[in-house]
Image: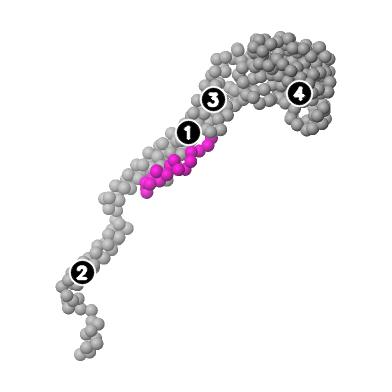
Amino acid sequence: MSSGKDRKFRFEPNSWPKGARVVFKLSVALVIAAACNLIISTWWETPKMSNIRRDNRRLEAKYEILKGKVESAERTLADIKHRDQNIYRPLLGVDTLNLPIVYVDYADTKYEPLLEDEYYGELTVAAWKRMDRLMRSIYYASRALDKTQELADNKAEYSSIVPAIWPIDRTKLKNISSQYGMRHHPTLGITRMHEGIDLTAPIGTAVYATGYGTVSQSQVRNGYGELIEIDHGFGYKTRYAHLSARFVKVGEKVSRGQVIGEVGNTGVSSGPHLHYEVRYRDNTVNPINYFNKDMSAEAYEELMEQVEKSSK
């Protein structure tokens, strides 16, 4: 026979109160149901899970189709950009379009609402970011082609404004005393940027407009001395400094090869010469790059040799 102590700890649910027995049976049923659900969901797919998996596969298939279309569009745009930068613009003689904001991605905060979707958030964000980059590339291509089309439509006018000849008679040129770039200033004794080239020639040598345009400056200016500036349009300007005489006024139209002044020694100058600048979109560029438009290959090579000697 069991002792009283054994009867005290014996597990006998039937001896429990009715309410406790009901709670116990419900708990056991819930545990069994949960275990069965775990087993079924692990080894057998429920209709709900089947529908979710089917929807996922459909979405992934649509995403792959969209991804393929975006990649195709990106390849087409890359080809357009390549032709614009390496064929059309060099043919027209202009630099590439610069739109820095186009290359900057949007802030991640723009896509935060898309991350609220537990299943497709990251996939959706990746797709939207790629689409946004594509749209910016399309905008860039549109702007670039619009500008190229404008230049092509005005090719005849454009070809007449580009500073494509020497500003003085080359037979009167003694040497190129200073080239474009950083140099030790012969008069001021400091190192600074030289924004043009210095063409040494006798005082009174005729100075020619290097392209069609409108005179935007004709005055005495600190450093430059007697100065003429011509606005050629399409972003181009040229400057002719240290002159001894000026023959044109502000607002006057000039043509390529027209005599606009004479070489002098005015302003900050160490001897008779013409300081000549080419500016494009308010930035100076090397005038030497334009001289070969009216020179033979042999003459251009000779010029470059002279430039190298002047820099030593």
- Circles 2 and 3: CB atoms closer than 8 Å: no
- Identify the residue under disc 1: 134
Q: Earlier in the sequence, mark 4 or mark 1?
A: 1
Q: In the shown orientation, is residue 3 left or right of residue 130? A: left
- Identify the residue under disc 3: 144
Distance of label 2 from label 1 (alpha carbons): 62 Å
- Identify the residue under disc 2: 23
Who is closer to the viewer here, 220 or 3?
220
Q: Earlier in the sequence, mark 2 or mark 3?
A: 2
Distance of label 4 from label 1 (alpha carbons): 49 Å
- Circles 4 and 3: CB atoms closer than 8 Å: no
| Kind of residue at disc 3 | Ala
Distance of label 3 from label 1 (alpha carbons): 15 Å
* Residue 36 % position (x, y): 26, 62
| Kind of residue at disc 1 | Leu
Which residue sits at x=48%, y=41%? 107
* Residue 274 % position (x, y): 78, 18
Look at the numbered disc 4 and give the secondary structure of its residue: loop
- Circles 2 and 1: CB atoms closer than 8 Å: no
Which residue sits at x=46%, y=35%? 132
Which region is colored magenta?
103-121
Q: In the shown orientation, is residue 184 left or right of residue 121? A: right
Q: Earlier in the sequence, mark 2 or mark 4?
A: 2
| Kind of residue at disc 2 | Val
Who is closer to the viewer here, 271 or 89?
271
Between label 4 and label 1, give the one nearer the viewer. 4
- Circles 2 and 4: CB atoms closer than 8 Å: no
